[in-house]
Amino acid sequence: MANAASMREEAETIAVKALGFVAADPELLPRFLAITGIEAHSIRRAAGEPGFLAGVLQFILAHEPTLMRFAEETGTPPAAVGKALRALPLGDDNHEYST
């Protein structure tokens, strides 16, 4: 069984591939930017923020045709994208609630 550090590294690798996939697509990138509110010139800085990579994977997972195209073009099994999401910061279902 893989340890948490290697699982997170693999998850980050998948998320970076997903970011490259989105950034290279002239239809996906504007949609991603509009949904996230990030400006194109700020992506590099935003990528270092906790939760950003999880957000990229959530974007991919939210639209099955996009997920399937990403999987096909990168050789990433679709199930691995969801697994990667859960291994990233803010990618699980545990959210802190303010009181």
Image (cartoon, rainbow, N blue to C red):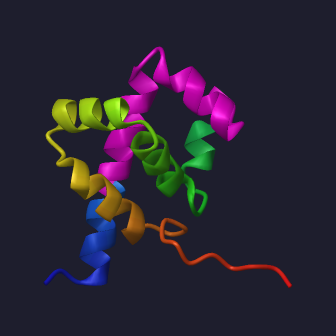
Q: Position of residue 63 (x, y in %)?
A: 42, 36
Q: Residue at x 43, y 67 (%)?
A: 88
In this picture, residue 35 sits left or right of residue 89: right
46 displayed left or right of 93: right
On screen, residue 10 above or below 45: below
Q: Is residue 29 above or below residue 18?
A: above
Q: In the rendered view, would you say 66 is above or below 7? A: above
Residue 37 position by quadrant: top right
Residue occupying image coordinates x 19% and y 30%: 73
**Is 3 or 95 nearer to us in this picture?**
95
Q: Which residue of the protein is positioned furthest toward the top in this rendering?
A: 26
User: Residue 26's x, y, as percent?
Assistant: 46, 14
Q: Residue furthest right?
A: 99
> In this image, 74 relative to 66: left or right?
left
- Residue 27 lies in the magenta-colored region: yes
Q: Is residue 21 magenta?
A: yes
Q: Main secondary structure of the magenta part?
A: helix
Q: Position of residue 68 (x, y in %)?
A: 26, 35
Which quadrant holds the C terminus?
A: bottom right
| Residue 89 percent across, percent down from the top left | 50, 69
Point 39% across, 22% down: residue: 24
Q: Magenta residues?
A: 13-40
Q: Please identify the quadrant where the N terminus is shown.
A: bottom left
Q: Residue at x 23, y 55 (%)?
A: 79
